[in-house]
Image: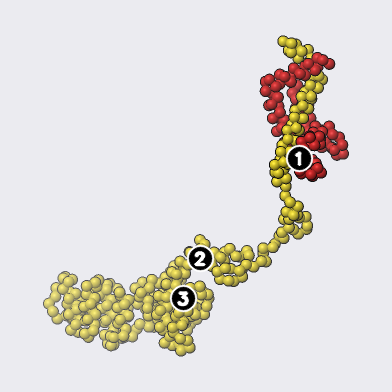
Chain colours: A yellow, B red
Amino acid sequence: MKMEEMSLSGLDNSKLEAIAQEIYADLVEDSCLGFCFEVHRAVKCGYFFLDDTDPDSMKDFEIVDQPGLDIFGQVFNQWKSKECVCPNCSRSIAASRFAPHLEKCLGMGRNSSRIANRRIANSNNMNKSESDQEDNDDINDNDWSYGSEKKGLWYLPFQNPNSPRRSKSLKHKNGKWGWSNGNYNNSTGISYETLGPEELRSLLTTQCGVISEHTKKMCTRSLRCPQHTDEQRRTVRIYFLGPSAVLPEVESSLDNDSFDMTDSQALISRLQWDGSSDLSPSDSGSSKTSENQGWGLGTNSSESRKTKKKKSHLSLVGTASSLGSNKKKKPKPPAPPTPSIYDDIN
Amino acid sequence: MNKDAQMRAAINQKLIETGERERLKELLRAKLIECGWKDQLKAHCKEVIKEKGLEHVTVDDLVAEITPKGRGKEYRCGFTMLPRLVLNSQGQAVLLPQPSRLL
């Protein structure tokens, strides 16, 4: 009660403020004292100067204030001209190109595996197609040895794609495709605009040459490619070489009209009439046997052998084409050209 | 005079009893660190210690050197960052940071 009376009576601002200031001063003095004790303890325990850096280190990390340098003292374009030595291939590479080079060099980046897979696929294709070409080339060339060149091609997958060897084989590939076409899935063609007349003529003697509607390119398959008819081939040759152009496959005196399904019927009926054994035209099975017998009687033994081999899987069209081709080749010795024809059918 | 002294004593006593003084002390300590008062004092301490020598510093030395500066009443050495206590319009005591004055 006494105190309250006292407090109530003494309440005016100036006095209040004075009292507040005093309390404040007391508190500050207490804080000072406390601080002194802390410092003294730190000094005596030896950890007072621990958070200071020594003057040598201070000099190292001083802020640099020179023109052309940043505050750490580094030059701006320093890393552009520097060259690093690759630990893998021991080449000196520019610093800014170092990381991508290392990725390719070590073969560990995302892209390098993709590129490697593509190269493997390409080299497999190239090897398949070039194995034939090399046979053809090596017969003609005496300059270089066969073994070393082959090794060079296969063991260096990182060869320059523009090297003369590669371009040479590509040119030959296109020219001589006709010999080995049956085994490959051909999706390339030739654009005829870039070829000269001599090249065109040589191409047309070995390849189908029919110009595709979609790609405007010449078909590079063989002369007997099933995608195009002889009529188309003749049209192309007339277009390129003039009206006197002749299809290269015309070697016999027989008629070379396009070979349709209707013709096959006529041929088969003619065969049946040629055959000597008893037949019924409606019976397809017996007609086939009669074909063979007819052929066996009328033609060389080699041809009959071939037809017998094909007996199991010859469709009507197949028989027609084989008959047709056999018919054309009858006057000539059948041995050399016929193997390729049968390859095509296969 | 007596009344004032009495009043002061009474107020102090009341502060201690309610624990308000401790609270105010903590508050002040935080405030002093915030405004940089403590770092200033520390730098001053280092100078004193380097003068006196590390081994021979006593508490009394430190107290004698530092407290006046800490209180902000040592005009010779320049002001410390001691905040001022001001009563605002609503009657509340507010600590304002001291403006730095060049000597």
Picture quarter containing residue A126? bottom left
Q: Give the residue displayed 74% in from the left and 51% down from the top.
A: A54
Vertically, is A141 above or below B16?
Answer: below
Q: Please name the residue shown 72% across and 43% down the image.
A: A48
Residue A255, percent across and down?
30, 82
Query: Which SS class for mark 3?
Result: loop
The chain ID associated with circle 1 is B
Q: Does A96 sit above or below residue A221?
A: above
Q: Nearer the viewer, residue A339 or A9?
A: A9
- Lower sequence index among marks 2 and 3: 2
How far apart are the alpha carbons under marks 1 and 3? 75 Å
Q: In the rendered structure, which amino acid carries the disc numbered 1?
A: Lys
Residue beneath disc 1:
B42
Determine if residue A133 is in view.
Answer: yes
**The one of A308 and B28 positioned closer to us in this rendering:** B28
Between A288 and A104, the residue placed more toward the observer is: A104
Q: Whole-percent x and y of residue A85? A: 61, 69
Mark 2: which amino acid? Gly
Side (left or right) of A279 relative to A52: left
Instruction: In this rendered view, identify the residue nearer to me: A14 or A332.
Output: A14
Type of the residue with mark 3: Tyr
Q: Is residue B83 above or below residue B90?
A: below
Classify residue B54 as left or right of residue A123: right
Q: Position of residue A310 (x, y in %)?
A: 24, 76
Please say if A57 is above or below A291.
Answer: above
Which residue is located at x 77 percent, y 19 percent?
Answer: B8
- Residue hosting label 2: A107
Residue A63: x %, y % from top left? 75, 53
